[in-house]
Image (cartoon, rainbow, N blue to C red):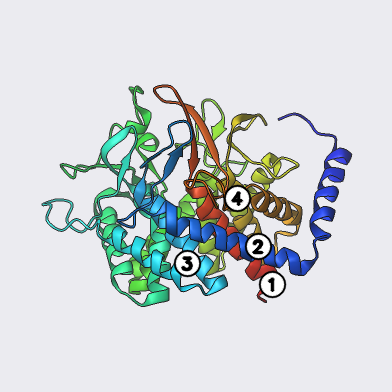
Amino acid sequence: MKTINRVTALLLFVLVITAFAEKGDGEKKQEIISAIHDGANYACDVLLDESGKSRCDYNLLQGKWFVYEAPWHTGQIIYGLLRAHDVTGTQKYLNNAKRAGDWWVGLEIKDHPVLKGMVNSIHGDYIEDQIVFATTSDGTAGLFYLYDKTGDEKYARVPTQAGQWMLEHMYVPSHGVFYDVVDAKTGQVLKENSPFWEGKEDQKLYDVSRPNNEGSLFKDMYEYSKDEKYNKVFIELCESLVEKQGPEGLWMDFMPNDKESGSFHPRFNLWYAESLLEGYELTGDKRYLEAALKTGRLYSKFQQPDGTIYYKNYLSGKSNRNSISGSTVAFAGIVWLRLLEYGVGEEFKENIEKSLEWTLKNRFSTDHPDKNLAGSFFEIRTRRKDGLWITLRDIATSFSLRFLADYYDYYYAK
């Protein structure tokens, strides 16, 4: 990352915030609501296919959608739509969240001799026929919230069953980790070789497992079932995260971070920080809050003066500028807002405003000629995969809906 003169950076921020403030508070509030409507309508009408599943990644060069980790992508859309419904009361958003939830619970495995009770949460992409823990758990927060809003038991029962299966078959309590991958055909848990590290010969425990607290699955299972064993597991995972967090505020021992190159995934660490904030809310243990605060501070250093956060960043301070992660801009904003709500986030107020301005500005108009883009929030992932792939990802819209709803609640709904 190039060193930016602190005075110049401050002036740039003041200019951005001043211009934003000139809109007036009422206009700003309306712009947020309008953006929520645009994004939620896009999620309902475009992102969810006829079955209720997320279309996932849109290849801009080919004009085609490609499915990738559909269970967690769909779960994120559910969460975003429910937050949009909280703010606007629009029934369409709740109806489509239920449509997506029905697809998700339809993944329940009912007749496999080993996998009965699990969900068929196939990762996809280069890991075919493999069920991944985080592909399941990352999507469950939306399902449990859907249960809270509708009272329909299936939206909590199915993810709870899946969590119970993973607890029985994938947990390593002595190390506070869960194995990552299960063979979808045999039900065998992969304990020695992970497809995420293909080509790495000598794989250790941390190559095939992680704390896997994304989505705070076991906290939600506990609050739904009142079974104390789930509460115990969730706390054990929070303790594991505190223990394994590096001084910079990240979890570099676990993929998709890469300790050797010093690169870190844009959202992975924020998920862990969010789960720690859930742990703080549940227990009041300030160590969890302080660990999440460390993560928030690290991300504030990588936010550019205009609010941008890139997809791939390095502990050295450098960033690859070929991919811009709107979902990370929004997700960091969610974590910063929550830290502010807990009384330790004053230092992030500027970052929150930059995330808000960036999120509102970087959207495709609702009359864009490509209907696959019209109304969406911006995120570009560029990579090489049998040629050049440039994709717009659905998660930019999902996380932006959550962030805008959280911002609205914090500043306008009190």
Residue at the spot 85% in from the left edge and 48% down from the top edge: 15
Query: Label 4 amino acid?
Result: Ser
Label 2 or label 3, whichever lies nearer to me, is 2
Report whether residue 117 is seen.
yes
- At mark 1, the secondary structure is helix
Location of residue 198 by image quarter: top left
Query: Label 3 amino acid?
Result: Leu
Left or right: 307 in relation to 246: right
Q: Mark 3 or mark 1, which has the lower sequence index?
A: 3
What label sits on residue 412 in the rendered view? Answer: 1
Location of residue 236 by image quarter: bottom left
- At mark 2, the secondary structure is helix
| Distance in Å between CA atoms under marks 3 and 1 | 18 Å
Q: Mark 2 or mark 3, which has the lower sequence index?
A: 2
| Distance in Å between CA atoms under marks 2 and 1 | 11 Å
Query: Label 2 amino acid?
Result: Ile
